[in-house]
Image (tube, helix red, strand yellow):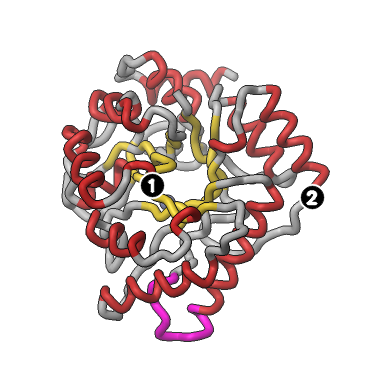
Amino acid sequence: MIIGSHVSYGPQGLLDSVKEAISYNANTFMFYTGAPQNTLRKDIDLSLVGAAHELMQNNNIDINNVICHAPYIINLANNTTETKYQFSINFLKEEINRCTKLGIKYLVLHPGSSVGLDPHIALDNIINALNIVLKNDSKVTILLETMAGKGTELGKNLEEIKYLIDHIINKDKIGICLDTCHLNDAGYDMANFDHYLDEFSKLLSLDYIKCLHLNDSKNPINSHKDRHANIGFGTIGFTNLLNIINNPRLKDIPKILETPYIGNTLEDKERLYPPYKYEIAMLRKGEFNPNLMEDIRNEYQTS
Ligand SMILES: [Zn+2]
């Protein structure tokens, strides 16, 4: 099983990300090249990249399974303000350059939000931008993420995803990242994941799926909310999520947890602990631990 989580990109960049992933016993990971909510980015130190690659090799992490995530504020769907649209296109180009320097193959991108535009026009704006950005000689593939349909988000159903993929010229450089919380919130039943994959394969080859974000959801199916829950503590549930990661049709793709950090106590949000080591262990074992939260708090408090 190729499984890991979101990790931070520390002062030593990718090297810190690898160290964090190893501490969770993960064999892959996902990172942002800076804060997800802003576009401030540091130059990449190539000597540290070499050290990061070596550490991956020595710890059974295949760099081809490592995922970079573009910041949320890139919005390719809305061109009402031309300068903002151009900024998003240019930032995405730079993000691809950063991935190339880091040796990372996959860049996950939220397709965008229409914010006031006709959704059809907004979808065409995304296509236009991606066709500018996706070059033949690029080593980086952009993975469009399936969205919950919160607000005016696009990419919330298979029809929109198919429309986007169909109009991308350079199809070798485009793929899909599924997110179980988003799919649930968008109205797809995660208890019947094979049905979703059947519907997907009627419209698009399953080969487009290159990554899976594994998250439980705080909200019921079709709620269009997008609030991630810890594995087994949401409305999708442990068994359904376990079945999804063990689905033979997605065997070789990386599974990435983006579940919330755990508070010191239920009320106290000041000290937050990463749940990933524990959730990965629980998923590998294949057995739900109803005391997971308490176990995490106890272990961090005594360590
Ligand atoms: Zn995402």
Q: Position of residue 164 (x, y in %)?
A: 34, 63
Instruction: Please say whether residue 109 is visible from this viewpoint.
Output: yes
Q: Position of residue 112 (x, y in %)?
A: 38, 66
For the point 54% across and 32% down, the residue is: 28
For the point 33% across and 62% down, the residue is: 166
Closer to the camera in the image, 270 or 217: 217
For the N terminus, give its image quadrant.
Answer: top left
**Image position of 161 with respect to 292: above or below:** below
Closer to the camera in the image, 6 or 292: 6
Task: Return the mark for residue 142.
Answer: none
For the C terminus, give its image quadrant.
Answer: top right
Q: Position of residue 236 (x, y in %)?
A: 23, 35
Query: Circle 1 sits in a helix, a strand or a loop, which is it?
Result: helix
Q: Amino acid at mark 1?
A: Tyr
Q: Of label 2 and label 1, which has the lower sequence position?
A: 2
Q: Tell me how far mark 2 sits from mark 1, CA to CA.
A: 32 Å
Q: Which mark is in front, 2 or 1?
A: 1
Q: Quadrant of residue 289?
A: top left
Neighbor class of circle 2 (other Cα within 10 Å; few <14, some 14-19, many 20+) is few
Is 101 inside the magenta-drawn segment? no
**Image position of 148 with respect to 264: above or below:** below
Q: Pointer 2: what residue? A: 45
Q: Amino acid at mark 2?
A: Asp
The residue positioned farthest toward the right in the image shown: 47
Closer to the camera in the image, 77 or 239: 77
The residue stretch that appears in magenta: 76-85
Q: Quadrant of residue 29?
A: top right
Q: Pointer 1: what residue? A: 208
For the point 79% across and 48% down, the residue is: 46
Using residue 85 as the reference point, say whether residue 101 is left or right of it: right
